[in-house]
Structure formats: structure tokens, C-alpha cells
Amino acid sequence: MTRPSKADTPHEVAAIMRSLPQRFRPDRLKGWSGTFHWDIRGAEEAEWTVRVSDAECEVVGGFEGEPDCVVRVGSKTFVGIETGERSPMMAFAKGKIKISNVGNMRRYDKAFFKFHDVPTD
């Protein structure tokens, strides 16, 4: 599986969400798993479910199942964070991101390469 490079960084919510399986780092989860509902206001496809475990990452449009964490964020903020143009900590501090379970979100965040950190094959 080829991972995306920084040059391939998408700037659309759907493309970013669909890139998660290619950026996934299952070795970072160590037996942990979670279901995340992403509510991305202003996006053409605003509702997403991401399931992660130490074996796989599944991304589906819409909300499915019971979430361990719900994330609400505007599409501009989401894209800015994912492309490295915005600080996730500053966005959280300013209330631009609402997270129902910060501990789960921290583990989730560690499970993915950032576009600027994706290793080249």
C-alpha cells in the first residue's frame, strides 16, 4: 500500500477522510480500539465514522454504531489541521473543535501519520 506524500495532500474533507487507512499506524494502538463520529460542519459530506484497532482502520460516510468519541469541527478548521496550516491545540483552545473524549482523541491522533510526516517508500 502506497502512502500519500506531502505533495499529494488533499484539501477536501472527503479526500482527507478517505486517506486515513493509508496513513494508519496500527502499531501505535497496542490492543486499543475505538469508534469515532466526525461531524464536520460545512463539508459536503459532513458525517463520518472512523473505527480503529490495532489491526485496521475503517472509514465510512455517515454515523454508524455507538461512538467512543464525537468530534465536531468546521470544515475549514479540519482541513487546516490536517494540512498542517493550523494548530490543533490552538483550535481546541479557541473552541473551534469540540471533543467528547479527549483521552480517546489523543490515542486516535497518534494512530495516523500527518501528511508532512508520511514516510516515502
Image (spheres, grey):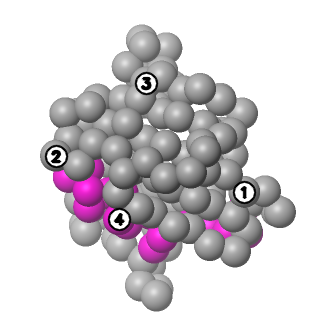
Above or below, comparing residue 54 to residue 43 in the picture: below
The answer to whether one can see residue 77 in this image is no
The residue under label 4 is: 18
Q: Are marks 1 and 2 in contact (CB under 8 Å)?
A: no
- The answer to whether 100 is drawn above or below residue 65 in the figure is above
Residue at image point 32% right, 37% down:
40
The residue under label 3 is 97
Q: How far apart are marks 1 and 2 (CA)?
A: 28 Å
Q: In which quarter of the image is residue 84?
A: top left
Hey, what amino acid is under mark 1? Ser
The residue where tag 2 is placed is: 44
Question: Residue tagged by mark 1?
Answer: 33
Q: How far apart are marks 3 and 1 (CA)?
A: 22 Å
Pick the front one: 31 or 7: 31
Q: Earlier in the sequence, mark 3 or mark 2?
A: 2
Camera sees residue 89: yes
Main SS, magenta region, reads helix
Amino acid at pointer 2: Glu
CA gap between label 1 and label 4 equals 19 Å
Q: From this viewpoint, which residue is outermost toward the right?
A: 31
In the image, residue 65 lies in the stretch drawn in magenta: no
Q: Where is residue 73 in the image (x, y as percent from the top left)?
A: 36, 29
Say which amino acid is labelled 3. Ile
Residue 86 lies, in percent from the top left, at 34, 32
In which quarter of the view is residue 14 placed? bottom left
First along the sequence among labels 1 and 4: 4
* Residue 78 against residue 73 in the figure, above or below: below
- Residue at horizontal 20 percent and vertical 41 percent from the top: 43
Farthest residue to the top: give it.
Answer: 94
Against 46, is 101 above or below? above
Highlighted magenta segment, given as a residue range: 11-28
**Residue contact between numbered discs 3 and 2, judged by CB atoms under 8 Å:** no
